[in-house]
Amino acid sequence: MRLINLHPDRGTRLVLGLAPFGALMLAYLIGSAVRLAANPADKLLPALTTLAASIERLAFLPDPRTGDILLWADTLASLARLGWGLGLATGGALAIGLAVAVLPLARAALSPLVAFVSMVPPLALLPILFILLGLGEVSKVALIVIGVMPVMTRDLALAAHALPREQIVKAETLSASTWLIAIRVVLPQILPRLIDSLRLQLGPAFLFLIAAEAISADAGLGYRIFLVRRYLAMDVIFPYVAWITLLAVLLDIGLTGLRRRLFPWSELRA
């Protein structure tokens, strides 16, 4: 049998999926043991017991200086910024993408601008945003919006353009107005793609969030990572990076479940 036709069963898929993670964990344990054997004070690859103690301190014990439980305070601050940024970006992308897809005049006026803005490196705009909007929450949210919305807008417009033209023609023959075509024909078919586009932008959104928090913040996951890096506190950095990754994975799973629940027909079409 050719390898291209060899499909693993469910148990084999589970083993193959977990194997790379097991290999990474084994490599870390070996590297940590080697470095700690050479230098017990080494901070680069802390032992699992050290990581566990740091997680307990960060996630369960109040900070002596502020009284907050640092991990949860930082998580709430970051998720609030991320939620505002992704919410505004999603709403803006849906409105502009739908207009560009349905209205030729809007397409001619907005498509070049959206394409141009999507090519601007968002992190290069961070100093400008801090100068114009200050060092508060607005500039951090604005960076997420600017970094995410143009890409989502172009993605939605492309998805709308891929819809069969016959659907628009049939709606027009039934005397549907432009507004009705946009709401009843185009919008329901691009909403699943909107959720998928949001899923694909979770990684960049976290990147922009952490970059903004690293420069100017008093709480947040990115702020904490860059605060302790000067002390080489890898026992804090590793758990925070793992927690950020877990949050992104959980958001991705949640959005996937939401799409399947709201638009089950999109699975059949895919």
Image (spheres, rainbow, N blue to C red):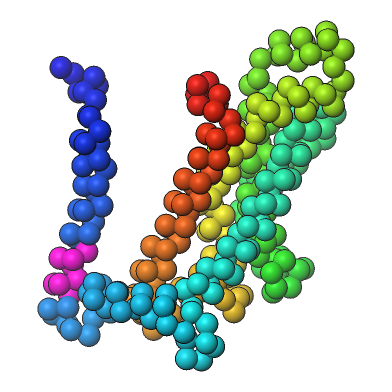
Relative to residue 78, is residue 119 depicted above or below? above
Question: Residue drawn at (24%, 25%), measured in percent from left and top?
Answer: 7
Relative image position of residue 140 (x, y in whole percent): 65, 65
Relative image position of residue 127 (x, y in whole percent): 66, 68
Would residue 161 appear left or right of 265 to someone viewing this image?
right
Relative to residue 258, is residue 142 depicted above or below? below
Q: Is residue 44 visible?
A: no
Q: Can residue 253 be seen in this view?
A: yes
The reply to whether the magenta stretch includes residue 95 is no
Would residue 58 appear left or right of 190 to someone viewing this image?
left
Would residue 56 appear left or right of 194 to someone viewing this image?
left
* Count of residue discs: 0
Prevailing SS of the magenta stretch? helix
Specify the farthest residue to the bottom: 65
> What range of the chain is rendered magenta?
28-35
Give whichever of 59, 155 is nearer the camera.
59
Relative image position of residue 213 (x, y in whole percent): 57, 70
Question: Residue drawn at (77%, 28%), measured in percent from left and top?
Answer: 183
Relative image position of residue 81 (x, y in whole percent): 63, 63
